[in-house]
Amino acid sequence: MAYSVVSKKTGKTYYLHSKDVTLKGGRKQTIYYFAGEVKEGALDALPADRVVIENERTGLPMLKKG
């Protein structure tokens, strides 16, 4: 089951995903994002070094290094 967060502002459920991308300089980096539905790349747990915060204006969840 994918890791999910419910927005306190909107009440909508968001699911955590990750994706490996290659930056312009050739460096590889993992990005984390929330989506409204479970797609390819969904994660079952929150990464150990991250915490979930919520944008006060939009209600969208984001990850922050904790």
Image: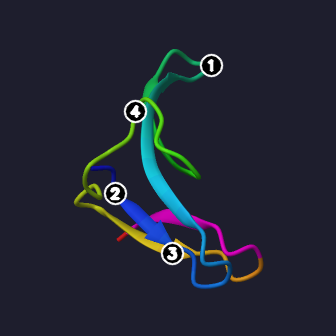
Whether tag 4 and tag 1 are in contact, CB under 8 A, the answer is no
**Front residue (pair 48, 28):** 48
Label 4, residues with CA under 10 Å away: few <14, some 14-19, many ≥20: some
Horizontal and vertical percent position of residue 63: 47, 62
Q: Which residue is mark 3?
A: 53
Query: Crowding at label 1, few (<14), some or many (≥20) Cα neighbours within 10 Å?
Result: few
Task: Judge from the rendering whether residue 55 lies leftward or rightward of residue 32; answer left or right.
Answer: right
N-terminal-most mark, 3 or 2:
2
For the point 68% across and 78% down, which residue is it? 10
Residue nearest the observer in this picture, 52 or 66: 52
**C-alpha gap between disc 1 and disc 3:** 28 Å
Give the label on residue 41, or none.
4
Q: Nearer the viewer, mark 4 or mark 3?
A: 4
Residue 5's spot in the image, x, y percent? Answer: 45, 68
**Which one is nearer the viewer's eye here, 19 or 38?**
38
Amino acid at pointer 4: Gly
Mark closer to the chain start, 4 or 1: 1
